[in-house]
Amino acid sequence: MTDEYIRDDVLQEAVVNVSNKLHIPEQSLLDYLHLQSVQYLEAKTDAGLKALKLVNAYQNIVSVTGDEQAASHWFNTTIKSMKDSPFSIFCQEGDHGLEKIAVYLQRFFGH
């Protein structure tokens, strides 16, 4: 998903779907986006770029794990070499956590 032509409502729906599939609590998602409600999410803002990063990270995780259920399981399971679950890393570190997850996926899976 790229931000070039994305509509606000499409991004709102996508990020809510991803957070549900990864079992990210609504408040954790809102904290990450620095918003009071996802309905205020606009694609061309910092929050929109953050939402897009999360959606793209999810797509990478699904491509590595093979399906959505496996992606959710992986995201919520402690990874020995990461010393925590990707979910915890995301919640604690936001964008930096997503970067750590991307590096892990690249290093171990070539994605």
Image: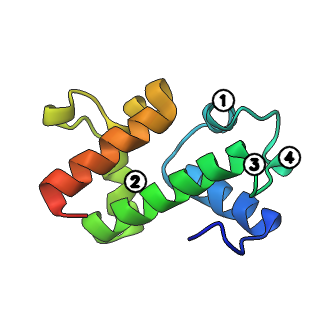
* Mark 1–mark 2 CB contact (< 8 Å): no
Q: Earlier in the sequence, mark 4 or mark 1?
A: 1
Label 4 SS = helix
Tell me: 58 left or right of 85: right
Q: CA distance from mark 3 to mark 4?
A: 10 Å
Q: Please name the residue shown 31% across and 35% down the image.
A: 85
The disc placed on residue 40 is 4
- The residue wearing badge 3 is 45
Neighbourhood count class around disc 4 (C-alpha, 10 Å): few under 14, some 14–19, many 20 upward: few
Residue of label 1: 31
Instruction: Give me the C-alpha separation between circle 3 and circle 2.
Output: 27 Å
- Mark earlier in primary sequence (3, 4): 4
Report the amino acid beneath label 2.
Answer: Ser
Instruction: Note whether 64 is above or below 99 in the view shown.
Output: below
Q: Earlier in the sequence, mark 1 or mark 2?
A: 1
Q: Earlier in the sequence, mark 3 or mark 2?
A: 3
Q: Residues within 10 Å of mark 3 (few under 14, many from 20)?
A: few
Question: Is residue 87 visible in this depiction of the protein?
Answer: no
Label 4–label 2 contact, CB within 8 A: no
Where is the N terminus found, in terms of image quarters? bottom right
Work out whether residue 9 or residue 26 is closer to the camera in this orientation and state it: 9
Amino acid tagged 3: Thr
Q: Is residue 59 above or below residue 78?
A: below
Q: Mark 2 sits on what residue? A: 72
Q: Identify which residue is drawn at 17% across, 61% down.
A: 109
Q: Name the kind of residue labelled 1 in the image.
A: Asp
